[in-house]
């Protein structure tokens, strides 16, 4: 959901021009295309009005000195803007748009409708305190993490935003309705909020020397006010919100189905996804058993496997094989260094096998910022579409300091040497970093900003599977086994996503599916249970996107025949940006663009 700010107005003269163009019966297709491009450009430029922080993250730095307003007046103004953009878009004759612009128009309408629905129906602004913590953290982190402008300029903008932090956090508290907040959201907010102050201490304070004495004084004053505001917010979270948090984290069938439809923008329904996931669950477990037998035979060469083993027998053989992978553990403080080594190894393989164009945009592996921890183990933070010369960050969360030795070992078993390699394929190369770097070269900024979760996450899963199929580390069956385990994880993600929020799946049932069915370690499953509560409809994007990617590849391969190569296919598939897969498929096969 875009975060609104007060005082926003659409360029009325611009919208008048749009309607005048569209009002002419003789308007040519080129005029309609131009009208849409003007509308899309106006929407992108208006993102600073919806949310200055979000604008900073995409690379628009015209409002870097402003911090979002999140009160009722700002929400009302944002809602008005959304309706105005929807009205202007509906006035277009879609039949007169080029295929490329029609795709963008469909994507924009989905986003506008989604944002309006989120504001009116889902209403996370009233019950999700993590939304505000993310904004407050990114307000500062987004200014100092990348060198898009001279450091002194960025610190002066940070000074301005820090000085607005008391107002922002006060507005957020006024917006939140404690009785509607699910307890898990309150608990996670209590853990994340101190990370905002840590950004100030670790990323702002050490750099102050570049400022003049007067600017340093202003920054120190702003820091004092901001840190006090964060401390006050922490007290409120612990003493007011947490004791009163009584909301249900399960959003229910009606909200879930609507949210899923907007998030996926796919023809697949919840029931169809569940049916596919159940079929794949059985198939992948059988594939794991086949690989596990070869691993087991290396240790026990005289084993005679039964012709028709039952599930408990398969389970035992797979677990025995996985234990071999778990012997190769990274040091608890060396995961980032290992990921760096494996990233280079993956890059070398992609180049050697001519799998896809290797981008030269910079990528750095970093420790995940504290205010972002508690939801996922790793993520790819790409540079904004308007900051394409800046580095992407492959962020990895450190192990929590309050974990027991047993919990640490559980985590390291899950994120063993092979799993870190698979994670790096997903987040780095040829996964998110490579995909986003190439996709963002598409000239439509709108398409880069409104990227599709299923396209991006599905590509990450596809990248894992494709690399192993292409022969990456094919000398080691344990890599194949872990690779299948990771695909099984995306399947169980999709199963529990809907089952938790719609069907009332309990923690015990979810943990059993992940640990016994998906062979996950306790720490991974426990973390995924938390994440599933906090991110309805997101966990389905991996499986759905992967299914759409493999179906698209099969269709294109059949159409191209002997002219099909991995390099040609991957380069073309990533040349259209990151829209929903259904649009890329239509463009690659010259099919009709799917319409709403």
Image (cartoon, rainbow, N blue to C red):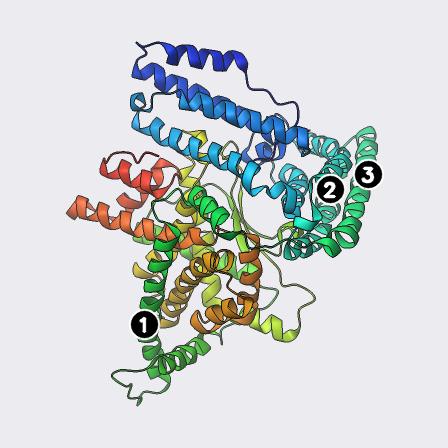
Looking at the image, which residue is at 50% across and 66% down? 510
User: Looking at this view, is 515 or 292 the one in front?
Assistant: 515
**586 versus 178 height, above or below:** above
| Residue 454 spot, x, y in % from top left | 41, 47
Horizontal and vertical percent position of residue 441 = 41, 34
- In this rendering, which labeled residue sits more in front, label 1 or label 2? 2
Which numbered disc, 2 or 3, marks the residue that appears first in the sequence? Answer: 2
Q: Are marks 1 and 3 in contact (CB under 8 Å)?
A: no
- Residue under the image location 30 percent in, 49 percent down: 354
Element under disc 2:
helix
Count residues near mark 2 (Cα–Cα under 10 Å), then give few for <14, some for 14-19, many for 20+. Answer: some
**Numbered badge on residue 286:** 1
Which residue appears at 81% of the width and 31% of the height?
218
Q: Which residue in the structure is indicated by mark 3? A: 225
Q: Secondary structure at mark 3?
A: helix
Neighbour class for label 1 at 10 Å: few (<14), some, many (≥20)? Answer: some
Please report contact status of discs 2 and 3: CB closer than 8 Å, yes or no: no
Badge 2 is on which residue? 173
In the picture, measured across the screen, residue 22 lies left or right of residue 339, that is left
Instruction: Check the image and report above or below for 286 versus 400.
Output: below
Q: CA distance from mark 1 to mark 2?
A: 51 Å
N-terminal label among 1 and 2: 2
Q: Farthest left residue?
A: 562
């Amino acid at each position: 959901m875009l975060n609104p700010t007060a005082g926003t107005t659409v360029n009325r003269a611009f919208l008048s021009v749009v309607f005048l163009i569209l009002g002419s019966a003789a308007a040519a297709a080129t005029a309609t295309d131009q009208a849409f491009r003007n509308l899309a450009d106006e929407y992108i430029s208006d993102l600073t009005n919806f949310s200055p922080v979000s604008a900073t993250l995409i690379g628009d730095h015209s409002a870097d000195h402003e911090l979002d307003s999140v009160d009722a007046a700002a929400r009302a103004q944002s809602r008005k803007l959304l309706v105005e953009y929807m009205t202007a878009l509906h006035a277009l004759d879609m039949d007169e748009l080029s295929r490329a612009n029609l795709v963008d128009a469909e994507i924009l309408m989905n986003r506008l409708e989604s944002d309006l629905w989120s504001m009116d129906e889902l209403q996370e602004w009233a019950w999700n305190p993590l939304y505000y913590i993310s904004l407050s953290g990114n307000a500062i982190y987004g200014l100092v993490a990348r060198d898009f402008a001279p450091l002194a300029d960025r610190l002066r903008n940070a000074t301005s935003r820090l000085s607005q932090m008391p107002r922002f956090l006060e507005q957020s508290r006024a917006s939140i309705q404690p009785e509607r907040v699910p307890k898990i959201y309150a608990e996670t907010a209590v853990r994340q909020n101190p990370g905002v102050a840590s950004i100030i201490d670790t990323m702002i304070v050490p750099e102050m020397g570049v400022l003049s004495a007067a600017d340093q004084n202003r920054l120190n004053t702003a820091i004092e006010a901001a840190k006090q505001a964060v401390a006050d917010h922490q007290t409120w979270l612990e003493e007011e919100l947490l004791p009163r948090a009584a909301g249900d984290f399960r959003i229910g069938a009606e909200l879930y189905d609507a949210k899923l439809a907007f998030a996926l923008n796919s023809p697949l329904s919840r029931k169809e996804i569940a049916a596919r996931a159940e079929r794949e669950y059985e198939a992948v477990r059988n594939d794991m058993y086949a690989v596990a037998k070869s691993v087991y035979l290396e240790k026990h060469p005289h084993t005679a496997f039964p012709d028709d083993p039952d599930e408990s027998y398969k389970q035992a053989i797979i677990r025995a094989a996985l234990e071999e992978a778990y012997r190769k553990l990274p040091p608890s403080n060396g995961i980032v260094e290992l990921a760096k080594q494996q990233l280079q190894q993956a890059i070398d393989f992609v180049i050697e096998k001519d799998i896809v164009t290797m981008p030269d945009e910079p990528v750095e592996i970093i420790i995940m910022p504290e205010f972002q921890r508690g939801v996922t183990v790793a993520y790819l933070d790409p540079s904004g579409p308007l900051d394409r010369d800046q580095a992407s960050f492959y962020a990895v969360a450190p192990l929590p300091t309050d974990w027991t030795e047993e919990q640490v070992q559980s985590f390291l078993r899950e994120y063993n040497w092979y799993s870190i390699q698979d994670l790096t394929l997903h987040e780095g190369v040829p996964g998110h970093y490579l995909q986003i770097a190439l996709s963002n070269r598409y000239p439509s900024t709108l398409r880069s900003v409104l990227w599709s979760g299923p396209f991006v996450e599905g590509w990450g899963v596809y990248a894992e599977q494709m690399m192993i199929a292409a022969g990456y580390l094919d000398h080691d069956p344990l890599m194949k086994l872990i690779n299948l385990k990771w695909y099984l994880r995306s399947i169980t993600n999709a199963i529990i996503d809907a089952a938790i929020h719609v069907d009332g799946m309990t923690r015990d049932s979810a943990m059993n599916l992940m640990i016994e069915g998906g062979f996950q370690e306790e720490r991974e499953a426990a973390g995924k249970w938390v994440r599933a509560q906090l991110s309805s409809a997101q966990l389905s994007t991996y499986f759905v996107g992967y299914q759409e990617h493999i179906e698209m590849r099969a269709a294109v391969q059949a159409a191209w025949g002997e002219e099909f190569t991995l390099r040609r296919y991957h380069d073309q598939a990533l040349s259209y940006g990151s829209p929903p897969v259904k649009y890329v498929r239509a463009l690659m096969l010259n099919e009709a663009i799917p319409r709403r």
